[in-house]
Image (tube, rainbow, N blue to C red):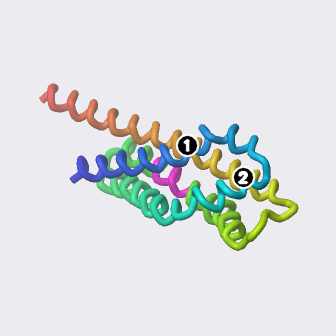
Amino acid sequence: MVFTIRFVALLLMGIAVGVSFGHELHYPNKMALAMNEYFIVQKNIYQGFGRILGPIEMGAMLSAFGIAIIRFKVPLQRYLHLFVGVTVLIPLIIFGLYLDPVNDAVKSWSAPPVDWANYRDQWEWSHRIRGYIMLFGYGVLIFATLKDYASAHVSAKGS
């Protein structure tokens, strides 16, 4: 059971990190876009991401917390997986506080408002921060997985 949940955690976290960190990769190009070009990108390319990525991030978080519960008697595993769960929870909170309001605003625009750059900066920086938090959490998840399997391998050899 731990293997399956860990596989799900690694898979879902990998997808979430890939999408979130992808924002970092296209950040310089998007910041160079003129207002109308940026507006077209925001209105057309990102529609529906949240409906797909939200459940993936929730699954990654729940599977990390699930491993923390299953491996509760192993303190290092418990704390590492709790930490990983928090590194998904924080980006979800950032989404709710900073990204979703911008997404809602953009949906209602027929043309960019005068202060469109403030919305752009909030959206882009929030995504960058989310990406780095999740990338760090994914690294911890990989470390926890390798550490747990290495410890099990050493224990099996020693018995």
Q: CA distance from mark 1 to mark 2?
A: 17 Å
Q: Identify the residue shown where x is 68% and y is 57%.
A: 40
Report if residue 89 lies within the magenta region: yes
**Residue 68 versus residue 102: which sits nearer the camera?**
102
Residue 96 quadrant? bottom right
Residue 72 in view of the camera = no
Q: Is residue 73 left or right of residue 133?
A: left
Question: Which circle, 1 or 2, is nearer the viewer?
Answer: 2
**Residue 114 versus residue 73: which sits nearer the camera?**
114
Report if residue 11 lies within the magenta region: no
**Residue that mark 1 sits on:** 22
In the image, what residue type sits under mark 2? Answer: Tyr
Residue 44 quadrant? bottom right
Give the residue at the far left of this rendering.
Answer: 159
Placement of 72 over or under 28, stated as above or below: below
Q: Secondary structure at mark 1?
A: helix
Which percent across, then down, holds residue 117?
81, 54
Q: Is residue 134 left or right of residue 36?
A: left
* Label 2 crowd bin: few (<14), some (14–19), many (20+), radius 10 Å: some
Q: Secondary structure at mark 2?
A: helix
The numbered mark, 1 or 2, whose residue comes first in the sequence reads 1
- For the record, the magenta segment spans 84-90
**Residue that mark 2 sits on:** 38
Residue 36 in view of the camera = yes
Placement of 9 over or under 110, stated as above or below: above
Q: Is residue 114 left or right of residue 132?
A: right
Placement of 152 over or under 35, stated as above or below: above
Which percent across, then down, holds residue 4?
24, 51
> Which secondary structure is most common in the magenta stretch?
helix
In the image, what residue type sits under mark 1? Answer: Gly
